[in-house]
Amino acid sequence: MAEIEAVAQNLLALDEDELMAQIGARSQAIEASPRAASIDSLEEEIPVPRGAFDDLLKAGKNIFAPASSQAYKLLCSPIGGDSDLAKELDKLMSEKTSEAAGKMTAALAPVLVGSLGLPQSIAVMVGSLIVKKVAKGTSDLICENWKAALDGTATATATATDASSPESSPIAHSEPPNPPES
C-alpha cells in the first residue's frame, strides 16, 4: 500500500485534465502491452502527444465516469455508506494533507480492481482522480462531496452531449435524433 500512496501523490500533482488524459493513454498502453496494467508501470509516465491530447482526454473520461459512478454506488449507497472503508475515507478526507490523499487512493484502488475489474494501474489513476475531485468539496464527508462531483459531471456530460452530434457522443442514445423539418 505504501507504494500506491507514493504513486498516488505523484498523480495527484497533475491537473484533472492531465490525469484524465493519462488514464486514456494508460488504457491504450495496456492494449499494446499487458505489463502496463501493473502498478510498477506507473513509475514510467506515458507521454501524451499534443495532437492526441483531446482523444486521450475523451478516452480517459469514458473510463473514469462509469468507474467513479459505480464505485460511488458501492461505497456510498445505504449498504456501503456505513462501511468501515467509507468511515476511514471520511477520516482521511478531514485531514486534508497529501499523505491522507495518497492513503485515500490506496484504500480505493482495491475496490476499483476487485469490484469493477479495472487493471491495477488504471485503478490507482481513477482513485487519484476521484480523490482529487472530492477533495474540492466543502464537506469532510467523502460521499457528500463525491455525489456533488458526480452530479456536476453528469450535468457537464449532458450539456456537452446536447451541444455535440450523436455520432461523437460517448453516451449511447436509445432513440434516433429527430430529422430536420423541411
Image (spheres, rainbow, N blue to C red):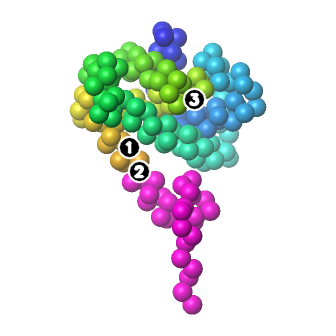
Asked where in the image residue 98 lies, by quadrant, the reply is top left
Q: Position of residue 29 (x, y in %)?
A: 70, 31
The CA distance from mark 3 to mark 2 is 21 Å
- The residue type indicated by label 3 comes to Leu
Q: Which residue is mark 3?
A: 118
162 falls in the magenta region:
yes
Q: In screen coordinates, is 63 left or right of 82?
A: right
- The residue type indicated by label 2 comes to Ala
Task: Find the magenta span and give its range.
Answer: 154-182
The CA distance from mark 1 to mark 3 is 19 Å
Q: Which residue is mark 1?
A: 150
Residue beneath the point at 48% across and 9% down: 2
Residue 154, labelled with which disc?
A: 2
Q: In screen coordinates, is 98 left or right of 141?
A: right
The CA distance from mark 2 to mark 1 is 6 Å
Quarter the C terminus occupies: bottom right
Q: Mark 3–mark 2 contact, CB under 8 Å?
A: no
Give the answer, above or below, for where 5 lies relative to 62: above
Q: In screen coordinates, is 141 left or right of 72?
A: left
Q: Secondary structure at mark 1?
A: helix
- The residue type indicated by label 1 comes to Leu
Residue that extends furthest to the bottom in the rendered view of this protein: 182
